[in-house]
Each structure stands twice: as structure tokens, then as C-alpha cells.
Amino acid sequence: MTVYHAGDYRKHSRRGSHRGKGGAGGNGGNGGGKLDRNGRVSLGPWNPLCAIAGVLAVLSGCATAARAIAPARMPELFAGIPVNALIILTVALAVITLILVIVARRVAHKAGVGHGIASTWGIIALVLSLMLAGCGWAANTLFPQGVVEEKVLDAAPIDDPKAMEADLDKVFGTCTSGWQGMDASSYPGVKSVEMCSDTRVVFAVFDNDTSVGIYKAPIASKAREVLAQYQDQAGNAKYSMLAGKRWVLVGEQKGTETLQKTWGGAISNIE
């Protein structure tokens, strides 16, 4: 039979009270972590923030890679954003994700619980977003115009000069003075050059696709000189260049935009 002396009850009660508080900082040995309404250890907002930042970083990385690979197929919202700007955004979001993962894991460690799936996803998202940003950077460096280029219509009747002149008359107005052929014999690869002083239009046809890239700049320069002679007739008209695979045309901007719907090609401004 156990015999208790005076004061023993209070000593045992105090010891039991100390044990009830927990040697790991209270709250049932959870290292000081706070409990949520369900009785589980609460790690604050860090895990959700890891997941959100990781998702944003991956989305930015996807936009970067897509913008670099197929710029012509991007929505208008992203079409005007440079690839380098998207790369910087992706890296910044990846850094934010890394910081949040570190904080979330430190908080979980102090609470004596596992770090959770959100911070694990944060690490996966961090690696994935950086890989996508690297893919975008490589594609943009090797293929500045994009890996997948938009298919451009090219339907100018270059084998029939009369048909070309007829189409131009419909768009820019009838060339009453007649189309004037210009000597192109000193320019290898140039098949013909014609001009109409009435409508202030100049077009050239080439023998091969590579000649267009060689002569586009000289033709634009020469066209500026020739068209300057008719400045009184043109007034404040703006000019632009419309170019296909084997032809180039310089004329008033409104007319080139209309002709593009029929002939195709790409428009560039002439200052």
C-alpha cells in the first residue's frame, strides 16, 4: 500500500503539469507551430505562395518559349513583347519561387513537420521555368524570326508583267503616261524594273529568291530619290515597300496595304 506524505500531491501535480506542456515547446510537441481549426500544424501562407509563384513562373516560361519559337502565332497581347523581357520576367519569378520555398521549408522544419507538396512543386516549377527560359533564349538567338515562321501569301504574277501592271492600275490608279522600263543590266539577279510617274509606283522582279535580300535596301534608297522628284504631286503621302520572294514594290502606303490582300508579301515602311 502506497503511503503519501503531506505535500506529495502538489509535487506530482506540478510534474504532471510540466509534462502536459510538452518538452518541444508546447502544443503537443509540434515545435511551437500554431494549430489551425482542424487541430493540424499551421505553416501560414508560405506553402500556397510557393504553389502560386511556381505556377506563374512556369506560365511565364511557356510564354517565353512559345514567343521565341512561333512569334507569328502568338496572341496580340504577347506579339509585341520582346523575348528578352519575357526571359527576365521568368527568371524573376523563378527567384521569387526559390525564396518562398526556402522560407516554407524553414517554417516547416521549426514546426517539426514535413515541408508539404507545395514546396516540392515549387522546386519542380523552378527548374521547369528556367529550362523553358533557356529554350526561349536559345531559339531567339539562333532563329531571331522564330523557328516556325508564318506562311505568307505570295501571289504576284511575276511571269506576266502585263498582269502585274493591270493589278497595279486597279489599286494605285491608271498609269496614263505608261509604265517605263528601267535599265537593270548592271544588277545581276534583277530581271526587270518598271516605274509609273503618274501614280509614283516602282516595282522590280528578280531571277531568284536570294536577290531580293541583296537589293531591297538599294531599291528603297533609289525609290526615295526618284519619288522625291514628284513630291509636289504626292503632297504628304507616305510610302512603303511590299516585298515577296522574287519581287519588290514601292508605292503609297494605302495602296500597298490594299495590294497586299491580293499579292501577299510583307510591308515595311520607308522613311
Image (cartoon, rainbow, N blue to C red):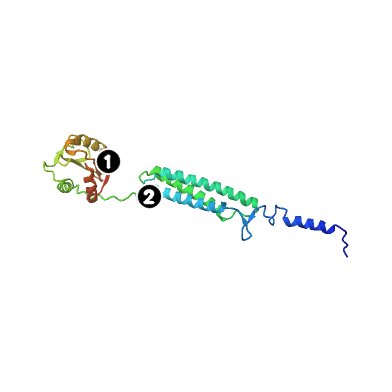
Q: Look at the image and tell me in which quarter the C terminus lies.
A: top left
Q: Nearer the viewer, residue 67 or 105?
A: 105
Q: Residue at x 24, y 35 (%)?
A: 221
- Residue at the disc numbered 2: 77
Please state which of the two labelled residues, at mark 2 or mark 1, is closer to the viewer: 2
The amino acid on which the numbered mark 1 sits, given as a three-letter code, is Asn
Q: Residue furthest bottom?
A: 1
Q: Nearer the viewer, residue 60 or 211?
A: 60
- Residue at the disc numbered 1: 269
Q: Look at the image and tell me in which quarter the N terminus lies.
A: bottom right
Q: Secondary structure at mark 2?
A: helix
Q: Is residue 231 left or right of residue 33?
A: left
Q: Is residue 3 above or below residue 121?
A: below
Task: Mark yes or no: residue 128 visible.
Answer: yes
Q: Position of residue 239 (x, y in %)?
A: 23, 40
Q: Residue at x 46, y 45 (%)?
A: 89
Q: Residues within 10 Å of mark 1 (few under 14, many from 20)?
A: few
Q: Position of residue 144 (x, y in %)?
A: 37, 43
- Closer to the chain start, of discs 2 and 1, is 2
